[in-house]
Image: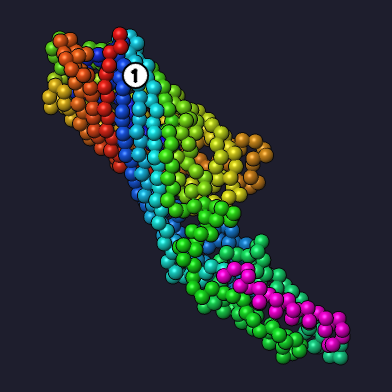
Amino acid sequence: MGHGTRCLGVFVCLAAPPVARAQLAPVGVPPGVVRFEMEGAFDSWDKRFRDGRKEGFGSSLATPSLDGATLPFLAPYDAILERVTGLPGARLNLGALTADAQADVSTAILGLTLGVTRSLAVFGRLPLTRARVQTDLDLVAAGANAGLNPGTTAQDPFFDQFDAALSTLEAQIAAGAYDGDPTRRTLAETTLAQGDALFGDLYTLLGDPATASPFIPTGGSASGAALAARIAALQTTLGTELGVGGFSAGPALPGAPATAQDVESVIGDPFGPIALQTSQSEVTFRGDAEAGVAVTVADRWDRDGRRGGLRAAAEGVLRFPTGVRARTDRALAIGTGDGQTDVELRGAVDLGSGNVGLRLEAGYNRQLAGDVVERIASPLEPFPARSLLANVRLDPGDVTTLAVRPFFRLARTLALIGSLERWSRGRDAVEYLSEADAIPGVDAEVLAEGSDASATMMSVGVTYSNPGSLRPGGTGLPVDAGWSYERVISASGGIVPDTHRVRARLRLYFGIW
């Protein structure tokens, strides 16, 4: 879910009257007044909701068996391994992969709001964001049968002897060395054919710089033992029955299963089939800037010396794609923006009497389509191949929000606030940007998996608002400030971060006419 959507509803603090007294933070300002806004937020999570169930944030990277099903580039080697070992269902298995991940997003928002008339204000805001994801992978060797390939150079002695033995056998067959014994000649021809096939498979698996697998069977595994037995049987046939010596070397097989560092190195190789870094991902950049208009529809709040009353306001926001999307070469990466434009409408009604008040809010965010580059794979696929990168047209699902925000005034300028908010997001629509971008056999809609979701958030906090010289007879610098803690308490459908958020705000008012 994009940064703009994650923050949806938290910015929903709508227009206030010219005289503000310790209620939820005002947005509108009196005519001729400029408000300078500074807001900071810190989000963190190490868990997420998926289909309503809580799981680790890094759970999509974990698997009980790290094999060709999880690392697709290993799958073609499984067929080779089955042929050369003769073991039905032989597979390369690196063990069980566990993953822990922690994400945090720090945002500083700078903004200006200008009061044009008593009921109309215009504003603009620019977020500055740092998004970071830390991932820790661990590989449990139980069940593992594969380790890091020592390298094609380490395999050269074996293939040099193997090739020389087959060449000698071929030359002896051509020279008629076995013509006097039909059985022996048949054995020689059969051995040559089988040896050529074995050489081709093993060279593809172990020794060809262009095709060799980064992971191969360990010497102590069942596959490694079967491979060694197959080679030893061939060497015996060549040396004792066909008179071809000089072939005694074996392939260089790893002595221990692969480690998590080995896996991360291969997966993160920028020239490899995955090219996906699993180390810390961090980006610091501007977020998605926004501009808008706030209109006070009705204002009968705190009139005639009494607290409370009725107030209603509406706000229109245009959010621009000035941030950066999550990097496609980092696992679980987070960006500073969504990469497309949003048009949002919000409304609020305040009701209150005495020290008790309530704000009711509703919002609708139309997320417009944008052109992006993504790996065309399910969000649950841990290590999608680099070959899946493609240009797509992404139309994010629209978001609706409903919120109830009660508050209680402890004093004229100080109040306790609470909030219960529910948001729902529709399913994304994704299609390839052009026919040339389409990947055969891969539906672009797979990117939309888990995009439709709903969540309920709860928050508590405190707000301070002193209108100062903006109030008739008042003096001093007008200021409002607030602090709140928010978290997701439930979610359904799709994937939703289990976010903990701390937010602080300071706003200063200056008259310019």
Q: Who is closer to the viewer here, 394 or 323?
A: 323
Residue for point 27% across, 18% down:
509
Q: Position of residue 143 (x, y in %)?
A: 47, 70
Can residue 427 be seen here? The reply is: no
Q: Residue at x 35, y 36 (%)?
A: 107
* Image quadrant in which you'd find residue 468: top left
Decide whether residue 152 is among the magenta residues: yes
Q: Residues within 10 Å of mark 1 (few under 14, many from 20)?
A: many
Q: Please indicate whether residue 443 sits to the left or right of residue 398 in the image.
A: right
Taken as a whole, is the magenta stretch helix, strand or loop? helix
Left or right side of 282 for 230:
right
The location of residue 133, given as percent across then percent down, is 40, 47
Judge by depth and name the residue closer to the eye, 221 or 120.
120
Check disc 1 and give the amino acid type: Thr
Q: Which residue is mark 1?
A: 113
User: What color scheme is it?
Assistant: rainbow
Vertical placement of 64 versus 14: above or below?
A: below
Q: Residue at x 42, y 51 (%)?
A: 280
What is the magenta range? 150-178
Image vertical order of residue 289 relative to residue 76, above or below? above
Looking at the image, how many numbered discs can be counted on the residues? 1
Quadrant in which the N terminus appears: top left
Could you tell me which secondary element the residue under label 1 belongs to? strand
Image quadrant assignment for residue 157:
bottom right
Please check the rendered image and state whether residue 226 is part of the magenta-colored stretch, yes or no.
no
The residue shown at (56%, 33%) is 371
Give the left or right position of residue 465, taking residue 122 as reference. Answer: left
Q: Is residue 443 left or right of residue 238?
A: left
* Spot occupied by residue 90 in the image (x, y as percentages of width and height): 57, 70
Residue 116 seen in render:
yes
**Quadrant in which the C terminus appears:** top left
Q: Is residue 159 above or below residue 408?
A: below
